[in-house]
Image (tube, rainbow, N blue to C red):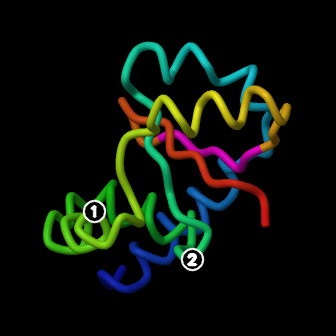
Amino acid sequence: MTATNQQEIIRAKVNLETAQMAWSDMQRYFASGAALFVSPELDLVETAFQMSEDNATQIAQWMAAGQFGRVTDEQARAWLEADASLWAVVVSPWVLVQPVK
């Protein structure tokens, strides 16, 4: 199996593991520091894949652009008040969350 095939299999697996969830159900991950924000401009599956591949260069670029990072207190509060639903996927030990477009 080629590296490209393996990457596509991993992406497909990540895609199958995404779920839409209420922020209120994910607060415990925020409280433990494990919730990471993915900007709506990014593809959640691709972001999770890059995390799983430890692509530090790409992750650092997203962080520098403010497109990726820990969920802030302000984000958590706004999502709770709005009873927001977010897309989520686990890349252990992290839970990546992205607002529903």
Q: Quadrant of the C terminus?
A: bottom right
Q: Is residue 97 above or below residue 78?
A: below
Q: Amino acid at mark 2?
A: Glu
Q: Secondary structure at mark 2?
A: loop
Give the residue at the far left of this rendering: 57
Q: Secondary structure at mark 1?
A: helix
Residue in front for this viewpoint, 58 or 49 = 58
Q: Magenta stretch?
A: 86-90
Q: Is residue 62 left or right of residue 88?
A: left
C-alpha distance separating marks 2 and 1: 13 Å
Q: Amino acid at mark 1?
A: Met
- Disc assigned to residue 63: 1
Q: Where is mark 2, residue-wise? A: 41
- Residue drawn at (46%, 38%) of the image: 71
Label 2 vs 1, first from the N-terminus: 2
Q: Is residue 63 above or below residue 20?
A: below
Locate residue 39, reporting x and y percent: 53, 64
- Residue drawn at (49%, 36%) of the image: 95
Locate residue 23, reporting x and y percent: 72, 30
| Contact, mark 2 vs mark 1 (Cβ under 8 Å) | no
